[in-house]
Image (cartoon, grey):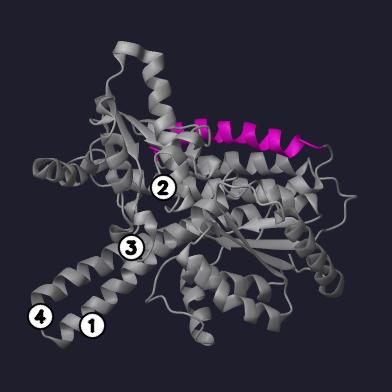
Amino acid sequence: MESAKVISFETLTENVGRFNVKNKTFLIPQMNRIGGHLLAATFRGFGIKAKVMETFKGMDLGKEYTSGKECYPCQITTGDILYFLKTEKERLGDAFDPEDYVYFMPESDGPCRFGMYNKYQRIVLDSFPEFKRIRIGALTTRDGYSLEGLIDEERVSDLRKASYFSVVVADILDRLLWRIRPYEKEKGMADEFIENSMHLMEEVFEVYGPKKNFERILDKLEEVIEQGKEIIDPSIPPKPLIGIVGEIYVRSHVYANQNLIRLLEKYGGEAVNASIAEWMNYTSYDRLREAKIGLRLQLKQLRLGAVKKYLKKMLDFGGDLYYQEIRQRQVYKRVKKLINIPHDHKVGHLEKVLKEKDLFTFDVGTEACLSIAGIVEYAREGFNGVVNAYPFTCMPSTTTSAIVKPLMDKLGVPYLDTPYDSSYQPGREAAIRTFMYQAHQHFNRHGRRH
């Protein structure tokens, strides 16, 4: 019994971490559909056999191998990897080799269960003899999701830059969809167009991502936007604008949030979700912030060796953040000349928003930092309502709700919490319909600025 315990602990360190994925199939869970596919395409351009797994088809497996106390995204992603592996083993038969695959499951630190997904899923995979040798590739917020170890060292920087660029472009395609679908000339046109555009941009990233030819990628993106604008029926008047914040997986995964944006559109709204790039910027910003705090502490204690270490961290994370924000501004500047989509929030500004009224602090961390400040910004920018989407029992989002509800009452902006687990809540649509009625009233009184 004692040896079994030792083995279980060893597997958490030996089979979860950074692994070179050369000649491996790199399995990417689907959170944001477009973002996952453009990221996988970018990886393929660098010679990594990346594949986005189907999602939500393995929910029965996810429920079977979790207790229900885990975070909802853990159930979904556990089901996704088990469904893929079981299907793949049936397809390949004796040719199936678990060592051909690396499952990608990043993590975050701080008081969030996301940091334990890959450990828990390691234990689940180890319970299947045929899956024990599949490794889990784990990137972490502790180093700003550095890609070191995945490929040869000299290519890591280029892969990181191209990957981040794919995230920003995916955000733009999502915002293009949400901008045109409520005003489409015929039902279904926007969805079909964006699906085709996603596949087109996959090809573009596969070819031009490794060359860092971002101008060529933006040229193709502009062509996509010009075509997308043709779908808009100019006779349809503007609709109430709804901002969405919350836990990154649930607000981005359409099955997890039970097609929240479509439901908001059904009742006459136009929605904008917080971006994936915002979270990427936040991880770099927070690591830079921690490095500055560490530097001040070491200077006070005259630990000169440690000062050098924290200075290097400041340069590294500061450089990452500077590059990311420059690239993001470059993309939005070109796109906004063609179509009016909301800009993205700068993380440094969001921290200032929290400090203004002493609402919260980045010292606590988690997505609550972004959600609370993002809600305030949505209200200031003239949005007609805000929705907070998150897993049931999610601590950061529950904290967000407790802080912003009285604030939104004072501001007179409709606000709605939408927690999710694997069940379907019979009163959910009625709550959203009521919220949208309030948003229409706000729109009729105040209009919208975007």
Q: Image check: 102 left or right of 429?
A: left
According to the picture, the residue beneath numbered tag 4 turns out to be: 303
x%, y% of residue 34? 55, 41
Q: Which one is in front in this view, the residue at disc 3 or the one at disc 4?
A: 4
Q: Which residue shows up at 46% across the image and 41% down it?
A: 63
Q: Which one is in front in this view, the residue at disc 3 or the one at disc 1?
A: 1
Q: Which mark is residue 296?
A: 1
Q: Secondary structure at mark 1?
A: helix
Q: Secondary structure at mark 3?
A: helix
Q: Secondary structure at mark 2?
A: loop
Among numbered discs 1 and 2, the one appearing first in the sequence: 2
Q: Which one is in front in this view, the residue at disc 2 or the one at disc 4?
A: 2
Q: Image check: 32 left or right of 116?
A: right
The amino acid sitting under disc 2 is: Ser
Q: Image check: 54 left or right of 448?
A: left
Among numbered discs 3 and 2, the one appearing first in the sequence: 2
The magenta region covers 187-211
Q: Which residue shows up at 24% across the image and 66% down it?
A: 313
According to the picture, the residue beneath numbered tag 2 turns out to be: 67
> Could you classify mark 3 by the number of other residues whose Cα lies within 10 Å: few (under 14), some (14-19), or many (20 or more)?
few
The answer for how far apart the CA atoms under marks 4 and 1 are is 10 Å
x%, y% of residue 405? 63, 76
CB under 8 Å between callouts 2 and 4? Answer: no
Query: Is 284 drawn above or below residue 182 in the view shown?
Result: below
Seen from the viewer's position, the closer of residues 187 and 185 is 187
Quadrant in the rendering for residue 385:
bottom right
